[in-house]
Image (spheres, grey):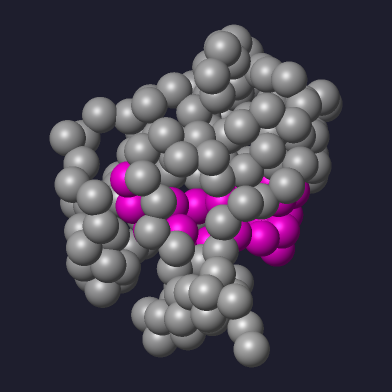
Amino acid sequence: GPSRAELGRKITQARAKQLGLGDRRAASLLLVGEVAPEWIAEAERGAPSDGSLLWPVRGGDFGRGFGSGERGYHLAIDIEGERGSDVLAAAPGVVGYAGHELHGYGNVVMLVHPGGRVTLYGHNQRILVVPGERVYQGQPIAELGSTGRSMGPHLHFELKFAGRNCD
C-alpha cells in the first residue's frame, strides 16, 4: 500500500483542491494580493506568527531593491545566493501555489500567512512543497535557481498585503 508520506500528500492535495488552492486561478489571485477568507483561516490553523519575516536565503546577499528598474517597476527584492541553496519560508503559513504557470517567474511558490499576507518566491531551481501544505517559519520550500526571466541565480521575493506589494 501507499506510504504514510504518500497518504499525507494525497490528503494535503485533496484539502488544497477543496479550498481552491494550487491552481492557476489561485496563483492569479495571489499574484495581485487577493486572498480568500478561507485561505487565511487555513493559514491561521497552523503555527502562530509573531508577524516577523525571516530573510529567506541563509547568507544570501541583497541584490536589487524594491522600486528599482525603469519607472520603479520592480516591486520586490532580489536576493543573490548559491544555486541549489535552500529558499526558506519567511513566516509560517500554507502553500497557496507551487508551480511554473506564471509568466516570467519560473518555478514559483506563494505562501498565505496568518492575517492575509502573501509571500512569493520566484526563479527556483526546484520546488519542495505542494499546495495546501502547512509550512513553518524557516522551513526549506524550494531550491534557489534561475528559472523564468532571470539573469543568474537569485531569489525574487515579494510581500503582498491588502492587494499591494509592500517594501
Is 131 drawn above or below residue 139 in the view shown? below
- Magenta stretch mostly in which secondary structure? strand
Res 39 → quadrant: bottom left
Q: Is residue 36 visible?
A: yes
* Image quadrant occupied by the N terminus: bottom right
x 62%, y 83%: residue: 2
x 66%, y 60%: residue: 99
- Give x and y (percent) for residue 75: 50, 32
Is 87 drawn above or below residue 58 in the view shown? below
* Image quadrant occupied by the C terminus: top left
Q: Is 95 included in the stretch rendered in magenta?
A: yes
- Give x and y (percent) for residue 140: 54, 40
Extreme-front residue of the structure: 1
- Give x and y (percent) for residue 104: 73, 47
Callout count: 0
Is 153 drawn above or below residue 140 in the view shown? above
Q: Which residues are magenta?
A: 92-111
x 33%, y 63%: residue: 35
Q: Is 153 included in the stretch rendered in magenta?
A: no
Residue 67 relative to residue 143: left or right: left
Residue 136 relative to residue 153: left or right: left
Res 92 → quadrant: top left
Is 132 drawn above or below residue 164 in the view shown? below
Depth check: give the residue in front, 122 or 18.
18
Residue 118 relative to residue 110: left or right: left
Q: Is residue 72 visible?
A: no
x 55%, y 69%: residue: 5
